[in-house]
Amino acid sequence: MKPRSYHGDVLADTWFSKVLTFDDAGVSDHPNHKALPEGVKQLLQSLPDGPAKPRLFTLISVPKSGKYVGIMAPVMAKVDLYVSKTMLYYDVLITRALENADIIPAGSKAPSEMDRTLMPVFISGIPAYKTAFKAMLAHKSQLVWFRWLYLLFSRYMWINEWTEVKN
């Protein structure tokens, strides 16, 4: 499916550096959400090439078991980030020790020195949570009973992880 030309006309006159959308799982498995990443990717590919072509990021869908942990989500994310950093530290330490013992060749690349792409993670505090809550309250037609549960317990109200989609 090719984007309609009027979208291209509007986008050609508007500069933006990033597009954020759902991933292929669509967060809630909703068909409209699941279709967005491919549609946006096609739309961005239809734009003229240039140095300022927007980058596409998709929100990573989490399993249902981790979806409704509410305010515990940022705590769990901070612990996860701390554990990851600690593991990386020990990985580097062990690599250097193995080099010094001539078990592996000197100059081996430790994980911290390897090319790696860090995944953008956004963790909200109380003020950002309140802002998101107020924004949802402004959409009264959306406030059916299960959306109240979402506002109170959804991990996505507190933390979002993004991955870049390369064109």
Image (cartoon, rainbow, N blue to C red):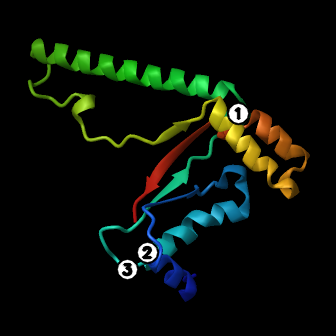
Name, please, the residue furthest toward the bottom.
5
The local secondary structure at tag 3 comes to: loop
Query: Between disc 1 and disc 2, whose residue precedes?
Result: 2
In the image: residue 121, left or right of residue 50: right
> Would you name the residue on which mark 1 appears?
65
- Give how far across and how far down residue 93 sits, in percent: 24, 15
Q: Is residue 24 left or right of residue 55?
A: right
Relative to 114, is 61 above or below?
A: below
Amino acid of disc 1: Ser
| Residue type marked 2 | Gln
Q: Position of residue 5 (x, y in %)?
A: 54, 88
Disc 3 residue type?
A: Pro
Q: Which label's residue is closer to the chain start, 1 or 3? A: 3
- Whether pointer 1 and pointer 2 mark residues with C-beta atoms closer than 8 Å, the reply is no
**In this figure, which residue is indicated by the disc labeled 2?**
45
Residue at mark 1 to residue at mark 3: CA–CA distance: 42 Å
Q: Is residue 59 left or right of residue 138?
A: left
Q: According to the image, label 3 marks what residue? A: 48
Determine crowd level at label 2: few under 14, some 14-19, many 20+ residues with C-alpha closer than 10 A: some
The N terminus - image quarter: bottom right
Residues marked 2 and 3 touching at CB (< 8 Å): no
Q: Position of residue 58 (x, y in %)?
A: 53, 54
Residue 119's place in the image compared with 29, above or below, is above
Between label 1 and label 3, give the one nearer the viewer.
3
The quadrant of the picture occupied by the C terminus is bottom left
Between the residue at mark 2 and the residue at mark 3, the CA separation in whole angstroms equals 8 Å
